[in-house]
Structures are given as structure tokens and as C-alpha cells.
Image: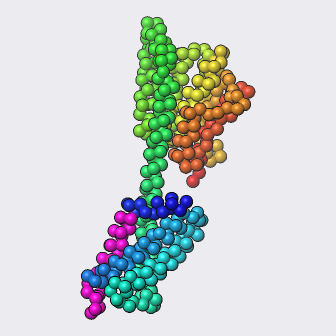
Amino acid sequence: MKSKILKGAFGLKKMGILILVNLVISILITILIEPSNQVGKFKLFQIDWIYSNCIGFSIYFSIHLLDSVKLRNWLKVVSVFMVILLASIWGGVLGTRIVSYLYGYQISFFKSVNLTFFLSISLIFGISAYGLFTLLGRIHTRKIQWLEEKQARTQAELISLRTRINPHFLFNTLNSISGLIHIYPDKADNMLQQLSELLRYTLNAADISEIDLNCEIEVIHDYLEIEKIRFGERLDFSISNKVDNFKFPPLLLLTLVENAIKHGISTALEGGRVEVRIGNISGSTVLSVFNTGNSLPEQHETGFGLNTLTKLLNIHYQGKARFRLISFETGTLAEIVISILS
């Protein structure tokens, strides 16, 4: 735990930013303060540089240790304020010792004028620096989340693509098109267009963070139409969407529909029905796919595709979405619940 905290504190980028901030503070203070007869401008800058680094690094490491403790928002604000004050006093005392050792100046840090000046400067720049580092930390965290989310989307894309672009799927699809070309050329043409749109959507999905729900519904409709040609009367489906202007990561709903076909419809001799439903319930958007046919066994394990889907939901919605599978006697319900309340 300690090594992890120290590793985070001693990052080269953070150290570089802190030294630069201390330098700017030293220059500003040197410009604003008139030097005494014994101290020239350059020596005053050196003294300010020492104090700035002692106080700056004291505040930085104290705040870094404080960040490793989980506190409520109001308590965190009070703690930051108190830590900056205490770290400023410790840093000021350390700076006074160093200045006394190097230059022989006896500066009384605890004089009311000096202490008020140092604490005021420390609070102003300490809080500003804390805000800067907090902002940089959030940007860095968001960048990591974005990269993890992109990786999860890429995995979902590969899984989804592998499900459809396999010899069996392509053989059945192209065979159906071949059988329709001379008898029903319009249907064959529509099927080719649907297959083309399906493949294009899947290939582009990894580069898209969010997509309009209606776009994915159109692709799902094309996918089910293709599968209906494959299964014939063995497949029936319906799509109901009661949500407007809703964006979410691509491939999520499509993956659930694919699993419904693969594990539910294709394993039943008589086929079955797939029902896609989207609606708002109690402050949440619910995306569900129900398939008749074979239900899940009593002890089931989600596949790699559904595990990736769950990971993507956790990363994208930061714990505000959940996925579950429910087994019934008549079939299986796959459900994604996304909280839309702030």
C-alpha cells in the first residue's frame, strides 16, 4: 500500500509540474517584494525558491496522502484546508532552517507578520495547485477509462463479428440469396443490402463511443430478417421501442439478440420467438431480449461475449448499469438496466 502511494506521488510528470509551479510562485513573490539592504534581488529569489519548494512539496505530499483516504465531500474540503495550513507551517519551518544554514539569516517564521504572509500565500497557491492536480488527475483517469472502454468495444466487435462472419453463417446467407435471385430477385437484393449494412455497422462499432438506439435497432431488424430467411417459419420476432433520443455503446443489444438466436432458437427443432423491448421503468432505461425455446440450465455461466458486455457496461456507466439473465420455463430473458437519474 505504501509503495503504491509513493509510486503515485513520485511520478516524473507530477514532479515536473510541481517544480514549475514553485518556480512561478518564487518569481512572483520576488517581483512583488522589495529587497532589504542586506538582500539583493537575486538572493531574495533564491530564498523565495527555497521556501516555495519546502512549502510546495510539504503541501503536495500531505495532500497526496490525504487523497488515499476516502472521506465525505464536506469533510474532504475541511481536511484539504487544514492539511494545507499544517503543511505550510512545517514547510516554512524547514525553509527557515535551510535559509539559516545556507545564508546565515535568522528569520523568525512565527512572527505574526511573517506567519500571516506565508500562510496566506500558501493557501492561495496551495488550493490553486490542488485544483490543478485534481483536474489533471481526472483527465488522466478519464483517458484510462476511455482506453479501457475502447478495448472492451473492440473485444465486443470481434466477438460479434466472429459470431456472424463464420463459414456456416455466410454459407447459409449466400445460399439463401442464391436461391432467391431467380425466383425473388427483389428479396435477394434486399438481403444483400441488409448483410452489407450489418457488416459495415459491426466494423465501424469499435471507433464509436455511443450511438443512437434507433441505429442499432435498424441493424438488429436487418439481422433478424436475414436469420428469418435462414430459419423460415421456425423464427418469429418483434421489436418494441418506447424510448426516444437515447444513446448507448454500440453492439450491446445486438449481442443479446445474437445470443438469443444461437442458444435459444437454433437449438429448438420447432424454433421460437425473439422479443426485443426497450422502455423506461422507474428512472431507468431497460433493454431486454426474450427468446422462447431452450431455457438456461440451473447452473449456467455467461459466455465470453456476455462477460465483455458486462465489463463494457461497468466502464461506460461507472456502476450505474447492470446486466442479468433470467431463466423461465418458456425461455430466457436477457436484460440491461441503465439508470437515467442524476
Tell whether 237 sits left or right of 156: right
Query: How many numbered tags mark residues here?
Result: 0
Residue at x 55%, y 33% (from the top left corner): 305
Whole-percent x and y of residue 104?
A: 34, 89
- Would you identify the image quadrant in which residue 265 lies? top right
162 or 225, which is in the foreground? 162
Image coordinates for residue 35, horizontal then vertical, percent: 29, 88
The span picked out in magenta is: 15-41
Closer to the camera in the image, 71 or 227: 71
The residue that appears at 42% across and 65% down in the rendered structure is: 132
The percent position of residue 167, horizontal first and vertical second, equals: 48, 18
Task: Locate residue 46, reporting x and y percent.
Answer: 30, 80
* The stretch drawn in magenta includes residue 83: no
The residue positioned 34% from the left and 68% from the top of the image is 20
Q: Is residue 22 magenta?
A: yes
| Relative vertical location of residue 319 with respect to residue 129 in this rendering, above or below | above
Residue 239 shows up from this direction: no
Assign the N terminus to one quadrant of the image: bottom right
Q: Residue at x 68, y 34 (%)?
A: 326
The answer to which image quadrant residue 181 occupies is top left
